[in-house]
Amino acid sequence: MSEKVHVLAKQGFGTGTNELYDRARPSYQANAIAHLRQSVRASPPLNVVELGAGTGIFTRALLAHPDWAESIKELRAVEPSEGMRDVFTKTVSDPRVSVREGTFDTTGIEDGWADLVVIAQAFHWCPDYDKAVSEFARILKPEGIVAFIWNLEDRNRAAWVAQLRDRIERHESGTPQFRLGLWRATFSTPSYLANFEPQEENVWDYVLHGTRDIVVNRACSKSYIAVLNPEEKQKVIEDIDAILQRKEGLVWIDEAQGIFEYPYQTFLVIAKKK
């Protein structure tokens, strides 16, 4: 994996961790993907670049959405992790889609090719916002857009989620997590101000089905938990079990089956090229 990738991302998303990531992480809400389509100024067919494409979770959601299914001419996924690319090729089977090695500021895409650059659940790892934005501007067509999208557990709507986040965030020291907002420096960089209009932001609240295993697997798929030794990881799992057993703020969908509400948000930022 490139030296331009954060060391914890290399370790936490390295070979052998990616199947769990793909299985554990949620897909993306249809209304957010529809809003993304409405934000693209160009007429189809569209060229799409997906940076930090991971295992293809967002790619599959985009290809399956009715607003996008027939709109894409070609989608080029760019992902620095060999392990993630391996899972991507196994889970995305569409002749319009290819995947290659690259980073936010070294995509290997030709000048002015893309109508859309999209980054799902990844941009908080960017090491140099100005260089990345310069690369986005280079590969986008005039009036193309960049979209940054994240799925987030909503700690404000359930006490147990807040407790869970407090517990696992003890291990994230030194990692550029979304919640820290470091990525917002992007929008004041020279390259952004020169090439893009002020960003537009949208948030959607929703509820997913949760179970004990879903919560544990999502926690263990986080980079800073994946790198823990077995004893430390087991302690995290035990803490999760204790939190769920307290049932503070837990809303049951089917208590007999152990299914409860898992509050989430999708956060979407749109940046339009001048």
Image (tube, helix red, strand yellow):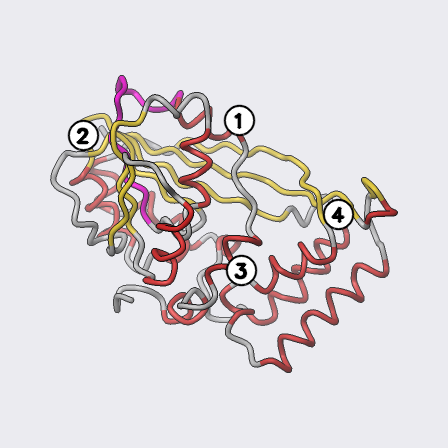
In this rendered view, identify the residue nearer to me: 264 or 46: 46
Q: Are marks 4 and 3 in contact (CB under 8 Å)?
A: no
At 36% from the left and 57% from the top, the residue drawn is 86
Q: Are marks 3 and 2 in contact (CB under 8 Å)?
A: no
Q: Secondary structure at mark 2?
A: strand
**Amino acid under label 2?**
Lys
Residue that label 1 marks: 31
Residue 203 horizontal/vertical position (percent) = 54, 34
Residue 208 horizontal/vertical position (percent) = 67, 41
Q: Secondary structure at mark 1?
A: helix
Residue that label 2 marks: 141
Residue that label 3 marks: 20
8 left or right of 103 in image: right
Q: Could you tell me how far apart the alpha carbons at marks 2 and 4 are, in whole angstroms? A: 43 Å
Q: Nearer the viewer, mark 4 or mark 1?
A: 1
Q: Is residue 230 above or below residue 122?
A: below
274 left or right of 11 in image: left
**Amino acid under label 1?**
Asn
Q: Which residues are magenta?
A: 38-51
Q: Secondary structure at mark 4?
A: loop
| Residue 105 inside the magenta-drawn segment | no
At 54% from the left and 33% from the top, the residue drawn is 29
Residue that label 4 marks: 158
Q: Could you tell me how far apart the alpha carbons at marks 2 and 1 are, in whole angstroms? A: 25 Å
At 38% from the left and 58% from the top, the residue drawn is 84
**Amino acid under label 3?**
Leu
Q: Nearer the viewer, mark 3 or mark 2?
A: 3
